[in-house]
Image: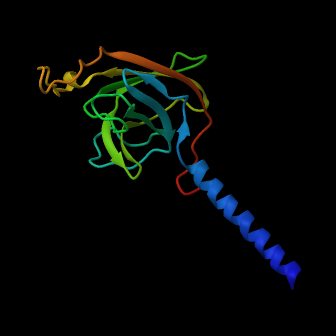
Amino acid sequence: MKTSTRAFTAAAMLTGSLVLAGHAIAGEVVVGEPVEKHGMEIGAVYLQPVMMTPELPGMGEKDIHLEADIAALPGNNNGAGAWVPYLGITFTLTKDGSDWSRTGAFMPMVASDGPHYGANIKLDGPGKYHVVYHIDPPPYQGFYRHKDKETGVGKWWVPFDVEWDFAYVGTGKKGGY
């Protein structure tokens, strides 16, 4: 009886591990190490394309949902740990060994894991890619700051770029992991 209980326990643990591993595989893929710049941590991840609302023209068949996850660092006078709103973020993707490229703009959006900037994107199949995020500060989107002595906050930064290299091997089919 003890042997069958041990076998059952081992099988249950293995099954649980495989289920958890499946969730990790189906989740976000980190594009590169987060970058700390201008009091923010900028991260890049992708996952399978997601359904969004409103669904705008051209949001059909895509390969990935690319995200910019941006949070204020401790010492940022606009709120440590908080998502940084009102950024203008564009991306440029290129594929190594090819003249293929894509550019576009990220949209601010929210998902079950919180707010981020993102877009569904069609890639040129598996391969090595280079991505550049160009980040404009909030006043470029019409968000201003107080600058007087009593209520003012620090100056906004100048626009800047961050970039990473990553390999794309596919994300699988939703539900088919």
Q: Position of residue 9 (x, y in %)?
A: 77, 73
In the image shown, does 147 or 171 lie closer to the viewer? 147
Q: Is residue 59 above or below residue 124?
A: below
Farthest-out residue, front: 150
Q: Is 90 above or below relative to 109?
A: above
In the rendered image, the vertical position of residue 27 relative to residue 162, given as above or below: below
Using residue 172 as the reference point, say whether residue 45 is left or right of it. left
Q: x%, y% of residue 150?
A: 11, 25
In this picture, residue 135 sits left or right of residue 6: left
Residue 102 in which image quadrant: top left
Q: In the drawing, does residue 40 fall left or right of residue 172?
A: left
- Residue 39, image x and y in percent? 37, 24
* Location of residue 36 (image quadrant): top left
Q: Going 31% across and 16% down the picture, which residue do you hit?
A: 159
| Image quarter of the C terminus | bottom right
Q: Give the vertical position of 75 relative to 16 (above or below).
A: above
Instruction: Say whether residue 63 is visible.
Output: no
